[in-house]
């Protein structure tokens, strides 16, 4: 294979979409696998919808995911510029060459006339395809100064079937008679997507075009353009290899949209999904590793990445799977990294209540059940502040019984003075002794009220670690408030 050159060509009309991120990732993995070049090109010719902040979001999100590029607007490269609005003169140049060679021509219909043509075809039950008007009609239109002109490709008559060779789908055939002479340059002077994409892909020597299946229907038009360029000797006659990846669907099998939750990569990252987990998840949306190992680094996936293992059927965006992966990656993080990443979610707390070492111990103690980084806020809330809010249900179910009073009384007696708060182990041992001394009460009947009194809930971090981190002062303070509450329960209305 000649040097692999692949690209991602996002339009900055929104934040980086998960579908575009998946396409970027597949191209990146393919480039890595073959020691090739991955190019980022910004397709910003839709002036109405393109915005600089979206370009920035796309760059930032790709980088956050660990997807870097060898050539692009910011890093340059041998085929610069990599932003379409900076390449307008190239499109104009190609347009003029096609025009001069009779491969393209100007058309002058108004929007209303085109609409009428489409309606007429519909009324006759025929598929619509624009055809060049007769020489007389064209001349009359041209003479009418009120009309604007668009440049169209002269699709060769009797071109027959266009066969698109797709590495995922095999040969896909399109009937060229159904393809009208399509627009290359709009009346505004800007190129259409199909025209600009082929000029760029050809000039940038792209060898493989891996993209969403939604672009399959554009491919015969693009093939016709490659053929026209080749006839003029503008580019090589060889078409890139196409690979159209199945779409990403929501769990209800409809198109993934905002209605199903976030669609932008940056939203997921903000919600506390780790970029590594998200990338791992994206890799599995339509591709599967040959060894069946679903959790692996991108470097590892890149060793195996192969277009033949990409599914043609759509992939379903399963939130449960993303959550499962994220949980895994959170648990695997070195604790210092976890602490750094958790920091933004802990801004409401006074972290100076704890030493760095104790914070690490706390975060390690709560992380097992976390699904996202954002969950760390709720999971650590009871460690901060002197007291703790006891919710009515917890009080009613766990603290309002004779057993609970006995347990808390015994706990107070033992922990007020006899147990040292020197280490989590010392406190676990203290709890074990308490359980022994309160037999035949079950461990659960002992630990639940203690946890409820000290943390306001019945689940949480290991109790020995919790007691150690809270420290004697907070423990006794909270215990005393719980004991007061039991002695004088709130009057229920
Ligand atoms: N700008 C197009 C898109 O974002 C690029 C399509 C292509 O890869 O050819 O869908």
Image (cartoon, helix red, strand yellow):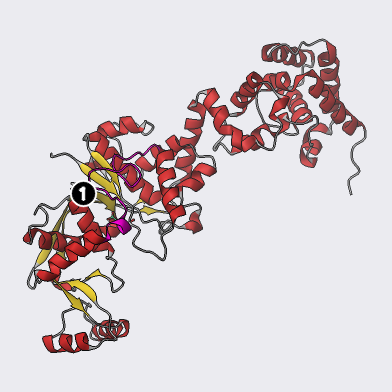
The residue pinned by badge 1 equals 204
Magenta region's main secondary structure?
loop
Query: In the rendered structure, does residue 87 fall within the stretch colored magenta?
Result: yes
Query: In the rendered structure, does residue 228 fall within the stretch colored magenta?
Result: no
Where 387 sits versus 106, above or below?
above
Classify residue 461 as left or right of residue 158: right
Classify residue 371 as left or right of residue 177: right
Where 186 sits versus 15, above or below?
below
Q: Image point 10% across, 52% down: which residue?
A: 238
Residue 368 location in percent, x, y? 56, 29
Residue situated in front as seen by the camera: 367 or 191: 191
Where 386 sits versus 258, above or below?
above
Residue situated in front as seen by the camera: 392 or 339: 339
Residues in magenta, as a range: 66-88
> Which of the 4 quarters of the picture holds residue 276?
top left
Give the number of callouts. Answer: 1
> Which of the 4 quarters of the picture holds residue 277?
top left
Observer able to see residue 38 = yes
User: Quadrant for ligand 1?
Assistant: bottom left
Classify residue 383 as left or right of residue 129: right
Observer able to see residue 305 = no
């Amino acid at each position: 294979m000649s040097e692999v050159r692949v690209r991602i060509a996002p339009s900055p009309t929104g934040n980086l979409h998960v579908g575009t991120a998946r396409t970027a990732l597949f191209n990146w993995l393919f480039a890595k696998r073959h020691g090739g070049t991955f190019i980022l090109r910004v397709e910003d010719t839709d002036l109405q919808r393109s915005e600089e902040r979206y370009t920035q979001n796309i760059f930032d999100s790709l980088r956050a995911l660990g997807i870097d590029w060898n050539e692009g607007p910011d890093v340059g490269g041998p085929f610069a510029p990599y932003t379409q609005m900076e390449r307008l003169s190239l499109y104009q140049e190609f347009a003029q060459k096609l025009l001069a060679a009779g491969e393209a021509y100007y058309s002058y219909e108004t929007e209303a006339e085109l609409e009428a043509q489409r309606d007429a075809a519909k009324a006759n039950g025929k598929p619509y395809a624009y055809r060049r008007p007769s020489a007389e009609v064209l001349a009359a239109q041209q003479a009418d100064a009120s009309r604007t002109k668009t440049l169209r490709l002269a699709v060769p008559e009797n071109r027959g079937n266009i066969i698109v060779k797709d590495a995922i789908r095999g040969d896909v055939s399109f009937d060229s008679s159904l393809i009208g002479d399509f627009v290359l340059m709009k009346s505004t002077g800007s190129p259409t997507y199909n025209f600009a994409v082929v000029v760029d892909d050809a000039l940038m020597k792209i060898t493989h075009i891996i993209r969403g299946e939604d672009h399959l229907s554009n491919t015969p038009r693009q093939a016709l353009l490659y053929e026209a360029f080749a006839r003029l000797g503008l580019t090589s006659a060889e078409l890139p290899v196409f690979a159209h990846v199945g779409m990403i669907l929501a769990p209800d099998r409809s198109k993934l949209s905002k209605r199903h939750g976030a669609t932008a990569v940056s939203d997921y990252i903000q919600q506390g999904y780790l970029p590594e987990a998200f990338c791992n998840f994206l890799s599995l949306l339509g591709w599967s590793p040959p060894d069946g190992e679903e959790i692996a680094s991108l470097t590892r996936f890149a060793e195996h990445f192969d277009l033949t293992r990409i599914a043609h059927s759509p992939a379903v965006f399963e939130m449960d799977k993303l959550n499962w992966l994220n949980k895994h990656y959170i648990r695997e993080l070195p604790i210092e990294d976890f602490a750094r990443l958790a920091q933004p979610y802990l801004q409401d707390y006074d972290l100076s209540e704890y030493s760095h070492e104790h914070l690490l111990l706390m975060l390690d103690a709560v992380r097992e059940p976390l699904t996202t980084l954002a969950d760390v806020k709720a999971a650590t809330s009871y460690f901060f502040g002197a007291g703790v809010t006891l919710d009515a249900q917890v009080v009613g179910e766990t603290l309002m019984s004779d057993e609970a009073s006995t347990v808390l009384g015994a706990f107070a007696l033992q922990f007020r003075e006899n147990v040292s708060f020197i280490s989590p182990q010392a406190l676990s041992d203290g709890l074990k002794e308490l359980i022994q001394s309160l037999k035949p009460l079950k461990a659960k009947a002992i630990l639940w009220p203690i946890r409820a009194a000290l943390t306001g809930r019945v689940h949480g971090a290991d109790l020995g670690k919790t007691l150690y981190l809270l420290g004697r002062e907070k423990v006794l303070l909270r215990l005393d408030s719980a004991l007061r509450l039991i002695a004088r329960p709130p009057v229920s209305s």
